[in-house]
Image: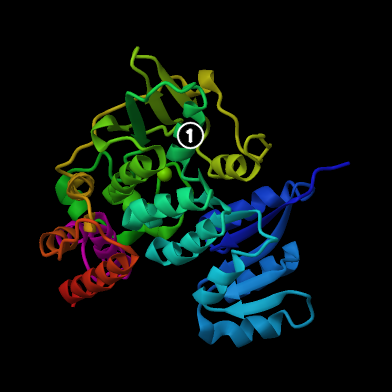
Amino acid sequence: MAARKRKIAILGSTGSIGTQTLDVIRQHRDLFEVELVSARSSTALLVEQAKEFDANNVVICDESRYDTVKDALKETDCKVWAGVDSLCELVKAQEVDIVVGAMVGFSGLRPTLAALEAGKIVALANKETLVAAGNIVTRTMREHNAVILPVDSEHSAIFQCLLAAQGNEVEKIHLTASGGPFRTWPREKIAAATAMQALKHPNWDMGAKVTIDSATMMNKGFEVMEAKWLFDVEPSRINVVVHPESMIHSMVEFVDGAIIAQLGCPDMREPIGFALSFPQRLTVGNKKLDFAQLGSMTFEAPDLQRFPNLRLAYEALERGGNAPCALNAANEVAVAAYLGGQISFYDITKINEFCLKGLNFVAEPELSDIFETNREVAAIANGCIA
Ligand code: MG
């Protein structure tokens, strides 16, 4: 008898991680069933996905688009809902086995917490939830015997390397970074870079927010925070190394100097597939690594002069409390403004730095403080832009 299919709820199914998750599921319809798809505002693709995968529940977070989705699905069995509150309720359902957290930014926090409170397995791509509220998110996970499986490629790699740890303590995590599209550019040229240029990531196919964060290296700073919370490793033991080929997805070093690395061609379907089917491995349709063809791999230290956001991230993490949440809030507003052509590349850092300096610091924030900080700092950042 075949094993029962795993039922998947995808928060943010129309984004880059969401569509790649559905692509993995499409290749393994015998293993997975789509219980829920949701999107912020992309109605046409959401409807198409709901039909193709015969999703039981469909959530459009932008409530003003409910009628459009409802109408487009009126001939189907799909139940249509609107708003993030619906999402928070639906992820708790008995029917859901795995929740894929693929929403963008802070918006993913509430539904992720709801899934963890219900003791679900959360395949987490939405790193901002851990950046903003890492302590609360991991505490909620432990209290409800929930599980977070990393989908971020670096953290999936670390997770895979740790399977070799056999209880030995981690000496160091080496978090690899591609360096982004501006790795070799001089500072003056980066200063004038447009969002179009920043969106051309050399190796990874990702959404707009994370691609800009990669170009500023804020993404790597957030990943240091994510690693701290997921693996309980102090920031001083997390080393960022630029590795332009992106073949090594990250490494773990032990006390004897032995380093375990996880490698593969950069393709997000690999960490997605591993999170969905853990501990089994699936074919996901990716290209396989050919060492002879690759020839060599290179490494360099990150340049904090040209990529100051990485320094800010370490500072915020060092300060702790609600500082990482504030940095995330400022950055979210700044990146949106940069994408909209309102500000320049290094204005992102200026806004981030300004918001961190003026922060109303809370050493041990509860969830209400996190929401308050997010709201307050976003308002200050918007004020900077105006
Ligand atoms: Mg990553």
271 on left or right of 77: left
Tell me the residue at 33%/35% (across/down): 233
Look at the image and give the residue range highlighted in magenta: 324-350
Judge by depth and name the residue closer to the eye, 168 or 150: 168
Quadrant for residue 50, please give it.
bottom right
355 on left or right of 232: left
| Kind of residue at badge 1 | Phe
Q: Locate the N terminus and report the quarter of the image it occupies.
A: top right
Quadrant for residue 335, please give it.
bottom left
325 drawn magenta = yes
Residue 17 position in % (x across, y down): 53, 54
- Please tell me in which quarter of the rendered image ligand 1 is found: top left
Residue 70 position in % (x across, y down): 67, 83
319 drawn magenta = no
- Name the outermost residue toward the front: 143
Residue 188 position in % (x across, y down): 15, 50
Judge by depth and name the residue closer to the eye, 158 or 293: 158
Quadrant for residue 254, please give it.
top left
Judge by depth and name the residue closer to the eye, 287 or 40: 40
Q: Locate the C terminus and report the quarter of the image it occupies.
A: bottom left
Q: Residues within 10 Å of mark 1 (few under 14, many from 20)?
A: many
Judge by depth and name the residue closer to the eye, 122 or 330: 122
Tell me the residue at 11%/65% (across/down): 358
Write down the residue under mark 1: 159
171 on left or right of 85: left
What secondary structure prevails in the magenta region?
helix
| SS at mark 1 in the image | helix
